[in-house]
Amino acid sequence: MSSSSDFDSPPREAKEKPRPNKVKEKRNKPKKKHKKKKKSKTNVGVVRTIKKKDPYISTTSLTRLCKTTGVQYMRGKVPEMLRLVLYMLLNNLMKNTVLYCEHRKAKVIQKSDICMAIKKIGMEYYG
């Protein structure tokens, strides 16, 4: 019968367990002195060449680019050859672009500098 009285009584609320007051002892560590980072000064005339260790265009992005132009299949070393050609083209283009920017005595490259560099390479730019 005692079990029936347990069902009749309202449910007990769960009591929250008291959390122990743990105070972390602060350790006296010597403060590190922050060194100021030197700002890198880049000259307009300096063109940085791409190193072989730098990230390059992935094979999947090259195949995607080729698919949009109409290529159906690519064999073995085609992506490597494309990377080499793109590297040479962009390196040449950026050198010419910086030359045009230096001629204007400016520090910011503009669209006109790139257009003139493209014309100097021998390609046509529409736009």
Image (spheres, grey):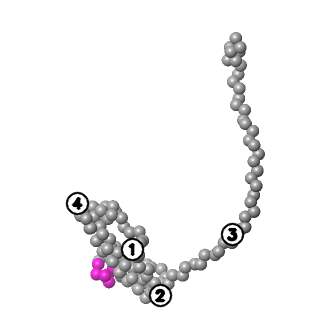
The answer to which quarter of the image holds residue 9 is top right
CA gap, disc 1 to disc 3? 37 Å
Q: What residue sits right under mark 4 in the picture?
A: 72
| Residue 60 figure quarter | bottom left
Asked if disc 1 and disc 2 are in contact, CB closer than 8 Å, the reply is no
- Mark 2 falls on what kind of element? loop
- Of the numbered discs 4 and 2, the one sitting upstream in the chain is 4
Residue appearing at x 35%, y 81% in the figure = 92
Residue 82 lies left or right of residue 9; in this view the side is left
Q: Residue at x 58, y 78 (%)?
A: 39
Q: CA distance from mark 3 to mark 2?
A: 43 Å
Q: Is residue 120 magenta?
A: yes
Depth check, mark 3 against mark 2: the one in front is: 3
Tell us which disc is closer to us: 4 or 2.
4
Residue drawn at (31%, 61%) of the image: 64
Residue 49 counted in the magenta span: no
Marks 1 and 2, the one that precedes in the sequence: 1
Pointers 3 and 4 in contact (C-beta within 8 Å): no
Amino acid, disc 3? Lys
Q: Name the front one of labels 4 and 1.
A: 1
**Mark earlier in primary sequence (1, 3):** 3
Q: Which residue is mark 1?
A: 52
Q: Residues within 10 Å of mark 1 (few under 14, many from 20)?
A: few
Q: In x, y percent, where is residue 108?
A: 47, 80
Can residue 115 be seen from the camera position used here? no
Does the rendering let one see residue 66? yes
Q: Horizontal and vertical percent for residue 97?
A: 39, 81
Q: Which residues are magenta?
A: 118-123
Rendered image: mark on residue 32: 3
Q: CA distance from mark 3 to mark 4?
A: 59 Å
Numbered circle sitting on residue 105: 2
